[in-house]
Amino acid sequence: MQRTARRDNTFERAVRSRLHARGLRYRIHYPIPGMKRTTCDFAFPGMKIAVFLDGCFWHGCELHPQSVKKNTDFWLSKIERNRERDAQATAHLTELGWTVLRFWEHETTDAIVTRIASVVETRRNAMLFDRTTSTLENEQGPSRKLEAVDSDITLAEAELGQ
Ligand SMILES: [Zn+2]
């Protein structure tokens, strides 16, 4: 129940709608490759950028210590498990070559949106550059392939005609 509440909280929605307004398109609650039942809050999968928006309570922000009066041990151990899972997810994604962006709920929407947009732009430019470079290198590749397909079709037609 709490998990659902956390998932679509106003903090997340505010950040997402600002990104959307800037023309950035993302996938929400994107499953982390190779980690069961673990998602990031949203992702730009093509660019391998994962974004986590961590609530101060659930993720154990040190600037905003939890003040729980009932079932203290239960909550503290739950928060501790969340923190461990956060660290594992970050390490795992980084190993797979993803860029991991984590923000705290107490950070301003402006700062978060600016940071995400700048990382996306940098990544997008790098990818455009890679694509241009590899297209130039493989200039002969695709046309040779097309010729091969064409001659297969001719062959097939010739066989049918017999
Ligand atoms: Zn905080």
Image (cartoon, helix red, strand yellow):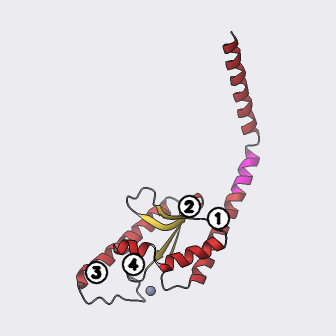
Distance Cα–Cα, label 1 vs label 2: 9 Å
Q: Residues within 10 Å of mark 3 (few under 14, many from 20)?
A: some
Q: Earlier along the polypeptide chain: callout 4 or callout 3?
A: 4
Kindly identify the residue that appears in the image at 52 percent across and 85 percent down: 107
Between label 1 and label 3, give the one nearer the viewer.
3
Kindly identify the residue that appears in the image at 35 percent across and 75 percent down: 2
Please tell me whether residue 142 is drawn above or below residue 81 in the rendered image. Answer: above
On the image, which quarter does residue 159 sit in?
Answer: top right
Left or right: residue 15 versus residue 73 is right
Q: Amino acid at mark 3?
A: Trp
Quadrant including the N terminus: bottom left
Kindly identify the residue that appears in the image at 46 percent across and 57 percent down: 33
Q: Secondary structure at mark 1?
A: helix
Q: What mark, if any, has residue 27 been given in the picture?
A: none
Q: Residues within 10 Å of mark 1 (few under 14, many from 20)?
A: some
Distance Cα–Cα, label 4 vs label 1: 28 Å
Q: Disc 4 vs disc 3: Cβ atoms closer than 8 Å? A: no
Q: Amino acid at mark 4?
A: His
Q: What mark, if any, has residue 48 been given in the picture?
A: 2
Classify the position of ligand 1 by quadrant: top left, top right, bottom left or bottom right.
bottom left
Quadrant including the C terminus: top right
Distance Cα–Cα, label 4 vs label 3: 11 Å
Decide which of 110, 33 is in the foreground and name it: 110
Q: Where does label 3 land, which residue?
A: 75
Q: Secondary structure at mark 4?
A: loop
Q: Where does label 1 land, which residue?
A: 123
Q: Residues within 10 Å of mark 2 (few under 14, many from 20)?
A: some
Q: Secondary structure at mark 3?
A: helix
Q: Disc 4 vs disc 1: Cβ atoms closer than 8 Å? A: no
Q: Disc 2 vs disc 4: Cβ atoms closer than 8 Å? A: no
Q: Disc 1 vs disc 2: Cβ atoms closer than 8 Å? A: yes
Q: Where does label 4 land, which residue?
A: 59
